[in-house]
Image: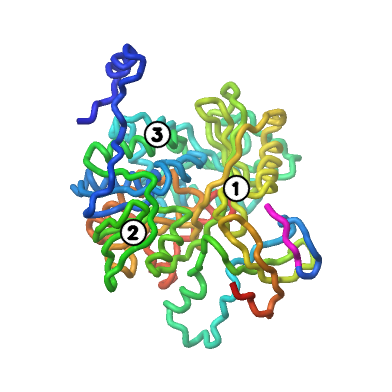
Amino acid sequence: MFLINCPYCGERDQQEFKAGGEAHIERPKQPTELSDDEWAEYLFMRKNIKGVQFERWNHAHGCRKWFNMVRDTSNDEIKAIYKMGEKPPSQ
Amino acid sequence: MRNKYSVFSLIKNALSFHENWQRAWKDPAPKKEYDAVIVGGGGHGLATAYYLAKKHNMNNIAVVEKGWIGGGNTGRNTTIIRSNYLWDASAGLYDHALKIWEGLSQELNYNVMFSQRGVMNLAHNLQDVRDLKRRTHANRLNGIDAVYLSTEEVKKFCPIINTSPDIRYPVLGGTLQRRAGTARHDAVAWGYARGADAMGVDIIQNCEVKGIKRNGDSVEGIETTKGFIKTKKVGVVAAGHSSVIANMAGLRLPLESKPLQALVSEPVKPIIDTVVMSNAVHAYVSQSDKGELVIGAGTDDYVSYTQKGSHQIVEGTLNAILELYPIFSRMRMLRQWGGIVDICPDASPILSKTSIKGLYFNCGWGTGGFKATPGSGDLFAHTIANDEPHKLNAAFNLNRFVSGDLVDEHGAAAVAH
């Protein structure tokens, strides 16, 4: 449980948000040409990092907008928050 | 030579004020090389080592554990054992484990306090009723004992449940597996550790894996905080930290690690003599031999390795518990904790070879691995020893995420995730 600084609404309780999993997984541009291995990689395989991870969050009980977050999963410390489409901060 | 536990050894040691009990397992320094190394000294890892030694004559093996044995999820779960899963593959896997549980205390000469007190799953809406009836039929076709109960039968089996039709989520029925129940989680780890140690397995605690050394496509050994250990076979049973180990070997897994919480109340006199689970409102409860209510909450929806969960998850579970069991309204909770569970997209485990020769993974048990401990160890030992899966764990391979042959057990997993 922690506070999240929504880029649109400001600081709110984590309860208002929905975690959307790993960020920057690009949808395949040519889905018909993907091999089964590449589909598995896109659909199922995750970094699941213990440490600094890039993820998507949604302010589900607020503005309902999506944004990105850089968070340390070993202590839940939020390192950065940036809007969809913005470049991820370099570490 | 390992001394056998018996009533005579109890009397003998009582005479010396229990000060001269033999150590249950040794505390060895790692050797330079082993035939196989198991990474992770929880129940599944220790069981794997035990069956490797017992059934496959692999005695020159070691279990390396970052902390102390049984200090992870083995000591943090709600100890429920059942096998009422939907699909044939899962039924085979979980019932294999349940059959071993039935004779485990005798086999290990260690009382794991396996208690077949029955597990009841409740239905709260029409879809629950349909799903649970379907699951009951599927179970019976697979030779697993399961019966469907009406609301009245639920009340009769567990009288403290509020079956009033005007609660928010009324009890419309339920299923009962009588062979299911609970066991003492610590004893499972200690019993397997003692059994494995007696057959020559080195159990090395406070030894964290820092890297996996590869030579091309095969494993050569592991780097640990106690130095390099040479081995051709590495079985990883690291639960929530499986992805961390996989990353060391350059392997990707379809897992997400999330905190799962549980809590216990103050001890009270016997009040609930079975296990009651409810998927829809997310409440499950049993009573330990000490008298504490043991309550399982859900997972958080974000990846975290912090071993603590969000408060609202516990609050939601307790709301549901109070509606179903108004009698618990003045109980006080004593302890709450979290464990990191590795969740697979299809809520089924992975017991599999990998693309790297000599590297095996036993992971993805998510929120319900404890029940499978003996079966998981037995089948994983078979997989490591023969470099081929047993027919009971063949479906739980890593390749199913490529082939699409998933074993979707979200319905039977009982914990919302």
- Which of the marked residues, 2 or 3, is nearer the chain's N terminus? 3
Q: Please tell me whether mark 1 sits on a helix, a strand or a loop.
A: loop
Residue that badge 2 annotates: B223
Q: Which residues are magenta?
A: A1-6
Callouts 2 and 1 in the same chain: yes
Identify the disc placed on residue B187.
3
Tell me the kind of residue under disc 2: Glu
The alpha-carbon separation of the residues under discs 2 and 1 comes to 29 Å
User: Residue B158: horizontal and vertical position, in percent?
Assistant: 59, 31
Circle 3 crowding by C-alpha within 10 Å: few under 14, some 14–19, many from 20: many
Q: Nearer the viewer, mark 3 or mark 1?
A: 1
Nearer to us in this view, B324 or B129:
B324
Q: Are marks 3 and 1 on the same chain?
A: yes
Circle 1 chain: B
Q: Which mark is residue B308?
A: 1
Give me the residue at 44% from left, 44% from top: B370
Q: Main secondary structure of the magenta part?
A: strand
Label of residue A88 in the image:
none
* In the depicted structure, whether residue B202 falls above or below residue B17: below
Q: 10 Å neighbourhood of mark 1: few (<14), some, or many (≥20)? A: many
